[in-house]
Amino acid sequence: MLRLLAVVACGTRTVIDAMFGTYGISELAYTPKLLECLGEGMLLLADHNFAAAALIGQIAETKTELLIRDKSNRVMPMIEDLPDGSWLALKGPVVIRVIDAEIEIAPAGGPARRERYPGDGRIPSGSY
C-alpha cells in the first residue's frame, strides 16, 4: 500500500506539490513536508483529518488561508460571538473563525444523512 498526499488547484486540477510514502505513516506525519508550496494569497481546503492544532499553526505561518471541516464532536471554546452566527475560537495558538454548517451526505447506493459541523462544540468562553 502507498500513501499519497497532494496539493491540487481546485479550478485547474493542477498538482502543485505531492509526496508519497509507506501507508504505515499517517497523513499528518507527511503533511508538513508539503507546506513549502503554500503561501500568501492561497486558500487551502482540507478535511477533518487535518484539523490538528499543531498543523493549523504551521499552515498559518505560511500566510495561507485555511478552510477545514472539523470533526462534528470537536469542542470549540468561544472567544467572541460574531453577528453572522459564527464565532472566534482558539485552535492551538491560532484564532480561528468557526462556522456552523449542516451538510447532507448522499453516498451512491446508500441512504442520505445530515450532519452538523461543528455540532455541539460551541461553549462560552471561560467554561473550559
Image (tube, helix red, strand yellow):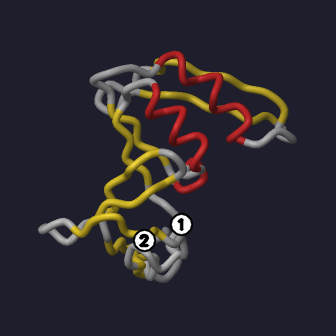
Q: Which of the marked residues, 2 or 1, is nearer the chain's N terminus? A: 1
Q: Up-down: is 82 above or below 64? A: below
Residue toward you, 21 or 26: 26
Q: Which mark is residue 71?
A: 1
| Disc 1 packing (10 Å; few <14; some 14–19; many ≥20) | some
Estimate the x, y position of residue 77 in percent, counting from the top left: 44, 69
| Residue at image location 52% in from the left, 78% down from the top | 110
Estimate the x, y position of residue 27 in percent, counting from the top left: 69, 41
Residue toward you, 121 or 30: 121
Pointers 2 and 1 in contact (C-beta within 8 Å): yes
Instruction: Determine which quarter of the picture holds residue 78.
Output: bottom left
Residue toward you, 124 or 5: 124
Does residue 113 appear to the left or right of 51 in the view shown? left
Quadrant in which the N terminus appears: top right
Mark pair 2, 1: CA separation: 7 Å
In the rendered image, the residue lying farthest to the left is: 83
Disc tally is 2
The local secondary structure at tag 1 comes to loop
In the rendered image, the residue lying farthest to the front is: 126
Residue toward you, 120 or 102: 120
Q: Which mark is residue 118?
A: 2
Instruction: Determine which quarter of the picture holds residue 82.
Output: bottom left
| Residue at image location 56% in from the left, 29% down from the top | 6
**Label 1 amino acid?**
Lys
Instruction: Determine which quarter of the picture holds residue 12.
Output: top left
| Disc 2 packing (10 Å; few <14; some 14–19; many ≥20) | many
Q: Up-down: is 123 above or below 13? A: below
| Residue at image location 51% in from the left, 51% down from the top | 47
The local secondary structure at tag 2 comes to loop
Q: Up-down: is 107 above or below 90? A: below
| Residue at image location 37% in from the left, 47% down from the top | 67
**Label 2 amino acid?**
Pro
